[in-house]
Image (cartoon, rainbow, N blue to C red):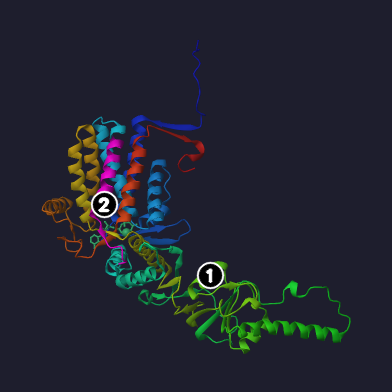
Amino acid sequence: MVGTQPIIILRDNVERTRGQEAQRSNIMAAKAIASAVRTTLGPRGMDKMLVAPSGDIVITNDGATILHEIKVTHPGAKMIVEVAETQDDEVGDGTTTACILVGALMEEAERMLDQDIHPTVIANGYRLGMRKALEILDSQAIIAKDGNRDLLVKVAQTAVTGKSIEGVRDKIADIVVDAVTTIAEKKADGTYIVDEDDIIIKTMIGDHIDDAELVPGFIIDKTRVEEAMPKKVKEARIALLAHPLEITKTQVKSKIKITSSDQMKAFSEQEQKTLHALADAVAAAGANAVFCQKGIADPVQFYLTKLGIFAIQDVPEADMKALAKAVGGTIVNKVEDLSDDVIGSASAIEEMKDIKITKVSGCENPKTVSILLKGGSQVIVDELERAVYDAKRVVQDALEDGKFIVGGAAIDTELLLKIREYAASVGGRTQLAIEAFANIFEAIPRTLAENSGLDPIDIMVDLKAAHSEGKKYAGLDVFTGKIVDMYEAGVIEPVRVKRQAVQSASEAACMLIRVDDMMITQSHRPGQ
Ligand SMILES: Nc1ncnc2c1ncn2[C@@H]1O[C@H](COP(=O)(O)OP(=O)(O)OP(=O)(O)O)[C@@H](O)[C@H]1O
Ligand SMILES: [Mg+2]
């Protein structure tokens, strides 16, 4: 017989929240996260100024960055931050949207829990709603698989609209589209694949943000080894070396015993000759520039200078690889391996004034490109870099999939109405949960309206009316407050961003709703 002794299954340092309290706690957390970022949504969203304990300042409206910086401790909130991080990793944009959607899903869940609808019914309805949403997104997509430049530019413009660097929006959009299309590889079936590491973003402080440029080649944070070397090389023929340009141990095979000054002289002459030969070999291979991953001995630098060869030493391995891809050369181990086949080319190598960087530009058919961003301060340059990163990712998403949707609340209103229609066909309690799922898409137009100082209720009424009349691209012009055709307004996004946001928001919400017991061990307790 079991005694009256209680059975202890948890260590006494475990904090436990159960039942409704656990659910409410996660709902609160999700709502809090959503309300923290919602004011940044859309072109008229505001920025957040985040100040780290060290005093470092970040000004941004990028959802992922904000959540990363504020370091939440609530376990439910952390899951939502993870949604934003996944969104950022997978598609590079739509992080604020994803958080708003989870917040809305949890808010709807709260309403249903109050009506005694069971969490598994809610989760089931949400799953059906999500499936329908993905289906609608696919069926509504505008398909252009041929790398339609016009649409890609619009995608890039939409991604950077409303960022604080909007003044250079069109220029940045053009640069990003050129960058992505330059390095994109066309597969046999006609679709594209993009390796985002092939676009290198370099930043520098100074000059105006308007001076951003695309370098069809590579930018390296290094300068020539010798002042006397040419500062600019035209029609560059580039040797890429992985080994040092100096006498290595293998070249001095046996121990040399020097007993007289003549021998000393002979040895040093021999050494000089070897070093001279290294420089000569570079020249003989037809190179007028050399990038060396290791050091270049002083005498070799001297001889290279005399030969009019430009040289950079201690180039990091990753830069060497990217450079090789940009100039179409091959990295070799020894100067003896240098030949016409391994030498890369660029129309110019140029060391920049004032700043310590070198531009290798005008590469034919480069497999990597660099984007050089400039700005008056670190804070500006950082936000510019985030905007370019977002734009680069969305253009990549759009080019790879060739599927676009119309943003600015147009697609959201379509989702809202179409999922509601679908819910009606399901019936029962699940219908309520699917309807609730549909409602979350109101959160986007509402938030866009609120952030623009417009009345969300009026806007919703107008949007629904327009869509009911079949105007599926009708959306909110946040600048005028009018309902306009968003396709014509050029607010275009890749389908992948919305798909990912809907999917990860729904999955996170379903998981959180089903939690009815939170056990937090001491070591994970918030704030510790
Ligand atoms: N010109 C525009 N007019 C109306 N709505 C727009 C316009 N440009 C973008 N939007 C809308 O703004 C929303 C995107 O806003 P925002 O870029 O601030 O957030 P996000 O993409 O969800 O997150 P983040 O960019 O922070 O990762 C989308 O719903 C998009 O359709
Ligand atoms: Mg965005």
Q: Amino acid at mark 1?
A: Asp
Q: Position of residue 331 (x, y in %)?
A: 58, 72
Q: Position of residue 203 (x, y in %)?
A: 44, 71
Q: Residues within 10 Å of mark 2 (few under 14, many from 20)?
A: many
Residue at the extreme top:
1
Q: Is residue 282 visible?
A: yes
Q: Amino acid at mark 2?
A: Leu
Horizontal placement of 525 versus 485: left or right? right
Q: Position of residue 112 (x, y in %)?
A: 25, 35
Question: Which mark is drawn over residue 319?
Answer: 1
Q: Is-magenta flag for residue 130? A: yes
Horizontal placement of 460 versus 305: left or right? left
Front of the two marks 2 and 1: 2
Residue 167 location, quadrant: bottom left
Q: Are discs 2 and 1 less than 8 Å apart at CB?
A: no
Say which of 177 and 524 sits in front: 177
Quarter of the rendered structure image containing ligand 2: bottom left
**Disc 2 target residue:** 137
Residue at the extreme front:
188
Residue pictured at 51% horizontal, 32% vertical: 13
Q: Position of residue 295 (x, y in %)?
A: 64, 74
The boundaries of the magenta stretch are 122-147
Measure the alpha-carbon separation of dots 2 and 1.
40 Å
Say which of 499 and 67 sits in front: 499
Q: Up-down: is 42 above or below 18?
A: below
